[in-house]
Image: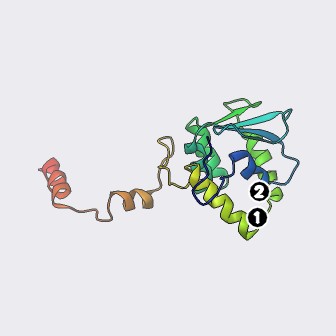
């Protein structure tokens, strides 16, 4: 079954997107939830993008943060590495920053539309394992330290 729209747009697969933005040779093999793959089959490291959630973490928090979030939530599975010490993978990913290819404007539009079709253009909440910084907690919980309820609770504890 095709995911193409009435206008004839055929979304790229995750593997095709990876190949468009990373110049070879890749130090790992990528397998994605949509059945696509990228990178050498015999690579010592394998990354499995198990769901659109993993892709959403990677796309909306680029760099190590998105990858780490996808990894700690179990939505990005790494093979060929000790699960308790995945730093070798992140070392390879650091080297990849030099291999990123800037897509053309038309490719960028196609990639963006494809990511949307794959369900990756949505903000994921920070994983429970991640401690939010104080400023973000304040924004989420409200900027005011004082409310009638909170003040009443504090006063009742002291008197």
Tell me the quarter of the image containing the N terminus: top right
Q: Secondary structure at mark 1?
A: loop
Q: Residue furthest bottom?
A: 105
Residue at horizontal 77 percent and vertical 30 percent from the top: 80
Residue at horizontal 61 percent and vertical 59 percent from the top: 113
Q: Nearer the viewer, residue 25 or 108?
A: 108
Q: Where is residue 43 shown, x and y percent of the image?
A: 84, 35
Q: Are marks 1 and 2 in contact (CB under 8 Å)?
A: yes
Label drawn at residue 21:
2
Q: From the viewer's perspective, tell me whether residue 140 is left or right of residue 158.
A: right
Q: Where is residue 79 shown, x and y percent of the image?
A: 73, 30
Crowd band around label 1 with a 10 angstrom C-alpha radius: few (<14), some (14–19), many (20+): some
Q: Which residue is mark 1?
A: 103
Q: Where is residue 148 shown, x and y percent of the image?
A: 15, 60
- Seen in the picture, residue 25 relative to 144 is either above or below; the reply is above
Residue 61 visible in the displayed image: no
Residue 157 visible in the displayed image: yes
């Amino acid at each position: 079954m095709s995911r193409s729209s009435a206008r004839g747009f055929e979304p790229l697969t995750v593997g095709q997107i990876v190949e468009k933005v990373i110049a070879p040779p890749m130090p790992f093999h990528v397998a994605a939830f949509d059945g696509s793959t990228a990178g050498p089959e015999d690579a010592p490291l394998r990354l499995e993008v198990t769901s659109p959630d993993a892709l959403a973490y990677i796309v909306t928090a680029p760099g190590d943060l998105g990858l780490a979030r996808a990894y700690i939530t179990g939505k990005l599975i790494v093979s060929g590495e000790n699960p308790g010490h995945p730093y070798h993978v992140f070392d390879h990913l650091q080297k990849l920053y030099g291999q990123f290819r800037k897509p053309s404007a038309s490719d960028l539009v196609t990639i963006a539309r494809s990511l949307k079709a794959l369900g990756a253009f949505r903000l994921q909440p920070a994983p429970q394992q991640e401690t939010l910084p104080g400023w973000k907690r304040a924004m989420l919980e409200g900027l005011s330290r004082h409310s009638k309820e909170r003040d009443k609770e504090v006063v009742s504890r002291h008197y």
